[in-house]
Amino acid sequence: MDMILAIDQGTTGTTAVLMDRELNKVAEASVDFEQHFPKPGWVEHDLEDIWTTVVQTVREVTKHIDVRKIAAIGITNQRETICFWDRKTGEALARAIVWQDRRTGPICEALVKAGKEEFFRDRTGLLVDPYFSGTKVAWALQNWPAVQTAHKQGRLAVGTIDSFLLSRLSGGGVHATEPSNASRTLCFHLTRHKWDPELTETLGIPNDIWPDVLPSTGVFAVTKGFPGLPDGLPITGILGDQQAALLGQACVKEGMAKCTYGTGAFLLLNTGRKPVKSRHRLVSTVAWALGPDNYTYAMEGSAFIAGAAVQWVRDGLKLIRSAAEIETLAESVPNSDGVVFVPALTGLGAPHWDPNATGMFTGLTRGTTAGHLARAVLEGIAFQNADILTAMQKDMGRPLGSLNVDGGAAANNLLMQFQADVLGVELRRPVYLETTALGAVFAAGLGAGLWTDLTDVEKTWKQDRTFKPQIKDSEREIAMNRWHLAVSRVTHSG
């Protein structure tokens, strides 16, 4: 029994990865699922669609192996997306409200106007923003009859994606989560490590609907009735996707940082055993908890749109047929010729936090080509991250020596070089780019006792390539000034 099954449940699809103890990839499978946009700014997922992709991908990666060799299962998941299901039957009561969803803007604005933002920030490390789960739950309790009825009858279970998957994997026997996910809800106290009744009361949410919070590693449950897997297989590690990527990048020491380029871009900096309160509107979050009193924290800045901008260029503008083609199109021109793209397609995240901002191209002329637009889109992704990392460095009071990068778009060499240029720091890209799933493998392995501690994780990280800054400080300043001018137009018009 030396294999670990990692379930990586993401925003647009689910991936299952099977690895052995030496981190050799035995099998991998991914299946996408449909996105639902019922109204402008609303984003929803059908939980049955998600569950179907979990079953499909697990079946695919295990079809040629002896499933009795699997020692443990690890889960990593899109974080702030919130689910509602029947505690007794396990059936979904409504679609999940996705982290990208902006419908709770009015609730957040009312809380801020009531002077509650600092109250939430002090206790949770988060900002009052539609991004986080708590206001989504409050909205559902106010607007969805099926959720209201289930609550009145004592049948309502609420949780992030990991909790829903854990319930299904265990045959409905467990309602639990862990701190990296719980700390994204606006309802979990960052240092007391429990659901906070004053926070939930402020949001109008009952405390009894939330899952139990267990450490990130250890036995959460065992499988029961899962197609193709034996009953009794332990689920021993769970982490939110970005914290899983931080672990998968072996950023296990204070001061180490990573950026994951997925649907959005997420920069996390390990701050050690204590949370750091940001002066630049970044958030503090739990990185992982290896035991009830063994917490590691991180500072995080999130850009809502990264790879999703490339998808938009493919599916909306139809300038490319596949996401990978954007690099070739962008390389067809030597520079963006003054075109700047602000990827505020679902508002702006850190450090601006403007839910009303919308996307914008500036600097267009008769000479602008598809190549210039493609290059500006990639540069816009990098500019967002430069703002976040600059804020992090100011909060920590020291510059970063390097930044580990991962995720699908990290394979784009043009994007990575421009990112290094505008950050002014060296980027380190690992051999295995899907470090989110790798973090789930590490968490499960630690929970199952296959590895003893984080030093075992450090030893496994392998570098593929570095990207060093190649522009002058003066060029960087000009580029960033052009970007900030474009952002000011977007946020002011919002």
Image (tube, rainbow, N blue to C red):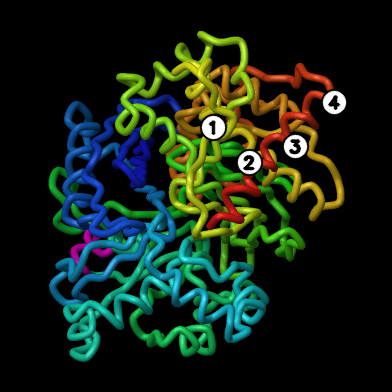
- Amino acid type, label 3: Asn
Q: Is residue 215 visible?
A: yes
Q: Which residue is mark 4?
A: 474
How far is the residue under mark 3 from the one under mark 1?
27 Å
Indicate whether residue 41 is drawn in magenta.
Answer: no
First along the sequence among labels 4 and 3: 4
How far is the residue under mark 1 from the one under mark 4?
28 Å
Q: Residues within 10 Å of mark 3 (few under 14, many from 20)?
A: few
Residue at the spot 69% in from the left edge and 50% down from the top edge: 270
- Closer to the camera in the image, 445 or 60: 60
What secondary structure is marked by label 2?
Answer: helix
| Residue 250 higher or lower than 199, as above or below | above
- Amino acid type, label 4: Ser
Kindly check if marks 3 and 1 are in contact, taking CB atoms under 8 A apart as contact. Answer: no
341 lies left or right of 59: right
Kindly check if marks 2 and 3 are in contact, taking CB atoms under 8 A apart as contact. Answer: no
252 lies left or right of 319: right
| Residue 360 higher or lower than 160, as above or below | above
What secondary structure is marked by label 1?
Answer: strand
Q: Which residue is mark 1?
A: 406
- Closer to the camera in the image, 415 or 330: 330
Q: Residues within 10 Å of mark 2 (few under 14, many from 20)?
A: some
Q: Which residue is mark 2?
A: 486
Residue at the spot 49% in from the left edge and 57% down from the top edge: 217
Q: Position of residue 318 (x, y in %)?
A: 31, 25
Q: Residues within 10 Å of mark 4 (few under 14, many from 20)?
A: few
Q: Which residue is mark 3?
A: 481
Q: Quadrant of residue 256?
A: top right
Q: Is residue 72 visible?
A: no
